[in-house]
Image (spheres, grey):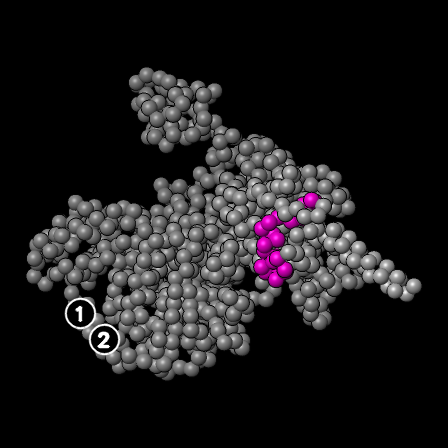
Amino acid sequence: MRIDSIDKLNRWREECRDNLGAHKKKIMVCLGPGCLAGGSDEILEEFIKVVSDRKIKGVSVEAVKKTGCHGLCARGPLVVIEPEGIFYSKVKKAHVADIVDKTVVKGELIDKLLYADETSGEKIVDYRKIPFYARQKKIALRNVGQIDPDSLEDYVARDGYAALARVLTGMKPQEVIDAVTASGLRGRGGGGFPAGRKWATCAKIDSDVRYVLCNGDEGDPGAFMDRCIMEGDPHTVLEGMIICAYAVGSGQGYIYVREEYPLAVINLQKAIEAARECGLLGENILGTGFSFDIGISRGGGAFVCGESSALMKSVAGEIGEPRAKYIRSVVRGLHDKPTVLNNVESYANVPVIIDRGAEWFASIGTEKSTGTKAFSLAGKVNNTGLIEVPMGITLREIIYDIGGGIQGGREFKAVQTGGPSGGCLPAEKLDLSVDFDTLTEAGSMMGSGGMIVMDDRTCMVDVARYFLKFLVDESCGKCVPCREGLFQLHRMCERICEGRAEEKDLAIMRDLSEVIHRASLCGLGQSGPNPFLSTVMYFEDEYLAHIRDRKCPGKVCRELITYDINDKCTGCLACISVCPVDAITGEKKKKHVLNQDLCTKCGSCYAVCTYDAIDIE
Amino acid sequence: MLLAVIRRQGIDIPALCHHEAIEPTGNCRLCTVEITRENWGGWKKYVTSCLYPVEEGLIVNTHSEPVMQIRRTILDLQLANCPNAELIQELAAEYGIHETSYEKQPEGDNCIMCYACTRICEVLGCSAISPVNRGHDKVISGPFGEAPPDCIGCLACAQICPTDVIPWSDKDGVRTIWDKKFDLVACKKCGKTIITREFADFLIERRKLPREYFNICDDCKRQELADKMGGIISQAEEAAL
């Protein structure tokens, strides 16, 4: 069906809403990355099979819906029964028949699948009342986990393409730019550059061709926000891009997605085809005479290709290496033409800004960081998952209220934000406001939204070593300070972890960091020393303990720790059976003995001991 | 670009990846300078002069302490990476570095990754070699680490290389470079080898040279010309008599 007028779109929207029916039963199965890893695709199939077998009155197979990431990955696989919002966690294939027979048919709850509060143990039925969800505010993620990503009807029913219709019929390009500028939307990819200003610059340049690009090259370890948007709500990305294209006067756009996100590529492709078929993309969009098309450009997964100039080279089929941006890519970008490049999450905000108004958007968050920010909450926090929070919320609220605190009741040590180029913030910074400028001032950065929480069993030198290694591997290798400088910085960090460093090395590392920051060609190199700089800023004691005392306070660095068995040992043989080098000997019900000469410090005994009988010194 | 103006003023700043024949890329970072403007309120920026456009009112400091610190550190890092490259040793010594402060790379091959070779290859129209891999594992190579199929054995890469790190040889009428062997065209007069067959064909085709251009070598061509000129002169002398 081709939607060639706004009226037709509005009529179709009513139809879509009627078909979906807010009152009707729906079984929503989360197929986000976390739940999928837990086998939710099989659960979905089972639901379809059971529902079609049972022939329940009023509940057809269409009631079973797959969705993108619902958010609370730690409790996956997740199933939500709508309209009540009944939230079942850790669902297994074997539970499916029960859920259909009891909950869907009779309206009974299955107690063991309900969410239990971390502290009180109280069961919560409606997911909207679970603190993890209750404290969030969803704009960019508004549809993720709520609709079937393959269904254009689902998207349209939830006001999809309404903003586009309004823009194409009632707004001049400059008015769109003004609205985005007034909303205060800043780039969600990490830089935080005002999107409106970028669009305005691009629109002003005299050129026959302009491009609109979407950066879906999310590469930070532990980050999956953009992935979840592309997989769970691909049409919002398209709509945001089309609106941008209209505003800047572009006829062609590309979404750059990494090959490691196969589902994102598939879902985006399906969405592009569906939108083209309906006349929402391509020639003469919605019969208004405006034409714009989008192609997908698949990347090989190089971290550096998330950098704008490298990304554009990669899209053009060249080697993905950054160039000096003394002339910015908005002026001379893809194929040397003016190019707007925004991140997935930035585009996902655009339709809502148009729909609900720039003023409404600007009223959320802080003065200079408006709106919300999506984060992937990972690490040693109870509720790992995908979240979206208003800017200006504190780290403490994210980690303790939404995240449910630290796993196993352990102590918080640091939170890493901003990906490899970001930094680690300690406990005394927990009350910082989460916005672009405050995080940068504190020595970290917003970045694209990865947030890794660390507990007291983390070694901060080891963390710096890990992230530096990542950057050494992901540096494009073109310019010397980044290629050789980060390589040497990582080597020195390794020497500290191995207890082979001297105190003067810290000064060399600081000087080297400054040069890498100043002299590198692109953002990757310039922010490359951050893992070291931010950890040494807040955890210098830990560095000194490694260097002066040859001790690792986090008890992580192998060369600096020893394992031993204490008197709590009950002689259960568990450690003996897992030790890969037979370093532990002993008999049943007698205290075991660890031979230090054989021990490789792999930590297997510590992991299996349930009696707290393994000491690490 | 700024570097040209700086050099025109007779100010000596190093630039290892820069060459008049090729587009600048800013790999070596040694030509970094400090820039500011009257209205920047003391704010300074560090840019590579080979890539920075010349602008009215720009205040450039080519030897400020932070700039010198950048150059020293880069040379120190290069010295660790290519401990045996003479050019690096000499330049580092000029900046007071005789021994690297960093861990020396035993497997270092003296390549400073300036891309001069790949850029000149591209300019010539072959693009036979390119940088491959990432980060510290980056090397210059033909596709898939094999002898580059598009290489014509012209030696431009070896000649432009500032650290002289690209091995090649001419022996028994055969040139070897990038693990590829080329038959050399010999001068029909003196027998001296002139050029690879592939390079000759490339020039005949692209530069529209006559097919017989490489039949004899430049020396013999000169000799022929001299003989001819001599003939004309003696004829003229005879006629005058």
What number is the disc on residue A306? none
Residue to which mark 1 is pinned: A19
Is any atom of residue A479 visible in this view?
no
Residue B90 percent across, percent down from the top left: 75, 43
Q: Amino acid at mark 1?
A: Asn
Secondary structure at badge 2 equals helix
Quadrant of the image containing the N terminus of chain A: bottom left
Q: CA distance from mark 2 to mark 1?
A: 10 Å
**Residue A546 or residue A450, whichever sits in front:** A450
Upstream in the sequence, badge 2 or badge 1? 2
Residue A340 percent across, percent down from the top left: 48, 68
User: What residue is at 59 percent from the left and 55 percent from the top?
Assistant: B202
Specify the quadrant of the image occupied by residue A217.
Answer: bottom left
**Residue B66 or residue A359, whichever sits in front:** B66
Residue A8 percent across, percent down from the top left: 25, 79
Residue A576 percent across, percent down from the top left: 35, 22
Residue to which mark 2 is pinned: A12
In screen coordinates, is A593 left or right of A589?
A: right
Q: Which residues are magenta?
A: B191-211
- Decide: few, some or many residues near mark 1? Use Cα within 10 Å; few <14, some 14-19, many ≥20: few
In screen coordinates, is A539 left or right of A395?
A: right
User: What residue is at 42 percent from the left and 70 percent from the top?
Assistant: A252
Subunit under mark 2: A
